[in-house]
Amino acid sequence: MHYNWGSGAGGPDSSARINAIEDPRGSSQSFPSTSYQFTFNSDAIPHLTGIANYMWTGEAYTLWYLSNQALSDPFSSSSFGTTTLLQAVQTNGLNIAYSFGYQQGSGEMTQMSTPLGGVLQWQYQTYTYSGPRNYREVRTRYMQALSGGTQYQWNIQPHSNTVLHGSTTVSDLGAGTSKVWTFRTDVGAFGGYASAYEEATLRVRRYCIRTTHGRRMEWGTCTWVP
């Protein structure tokens, strides 16, 4: 594995950015056994723009970016200059691409589109913990399998505990079902660990209790409850 020159360094293999991966399957003019070659743009902080393949398989990609995008925090709208966001990734040869959309200002990813027109979308909200500490959390997820297809929605509702979410409910609006994860809120090594899991429909509920044995976590017995 070879790396690029690091900023201010005196030679190659001094950056964390990969330049080439070699193994016996590859061949190129640059290195005798290169399997993958990575290229970057000339930004102040270089961004990956391409991955070339010298093994005659399909893993070769081109990446596009949105440059000079205004950046601000989602809490007070304070400005933090500009940033660069990944716009699309194309699989070369197949000429298909995945594209990405972002919340204007905060740069939070809000959409991912597939080559066949499928779409994943996310909506965020600010949650205030004790302190106070504010964090952004996904509260709604949408999915559309194909262009023009039905859009499905999932709502994500965490418990209102201001120290640690004691549970989170994911509701599937189309199916009329929900799943609930309960988490330990005690202070210690196991704080935040899942302690129970529940699946619910309009008619039945399924409970799975998770127990602690030392540092090992195991699923308990699941029962159906009307």
Image (spheres, rainbow, N blue to C red):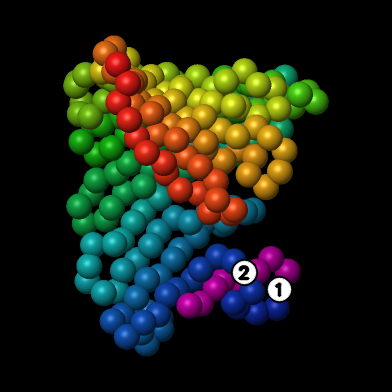
- Residue 40 vs residue 78, the one in the foreground: 78
Question: Residue sitting at 40 percent across and 50 percent down?
Answer: 63
Residue 12 falls in image quadrant = bottom right
- In contact (CB < 8 Å): disc 2 and disc 1: yes
Q: Main secondary structure of the magenta part?
A: loop
Question: Residue sitting at 21 percent across and 26 percent down?
Answer: 147
- Residue 169 vs residue 145, the one in the foreground: 169
Residue 145 in view: yes
Task: Identify residue for label 2.
Answer: 15
Question: Residue sitting at 34 percent across and 35 percent down?
Answer: 222
Distance between mark 2 and mark 1 Cα atoms: 8 Å
Q: Which residues are magenta?
A: 1-8
- The percent position of residue 74, horizontal first and vertical second, equals 64, 23
Residue at the far right in the pictured view: 131
Task: Identify residue for label 1.
Answer: 9
The dot on residue 86 is: none
Provide the secondary structure element on which disc 2 rests: loop
Residue at the far top in the pictured view: 202
Few, some or many residues within 10 Å of mark 2 (<14, 14–19, 20+): some
- Residue 183 vs residue 176, the one in the foreground: 183
Residue 72 in view: no
Q: Amino acid at mark 1?
A: Ala
Q: Amino acid at mark 2?
A: Ser
Q: Which quadrant is the C terminus positioned in?
A: top left
- The percent position of residue 224, horizontal first and vertical second, equals 30, 26
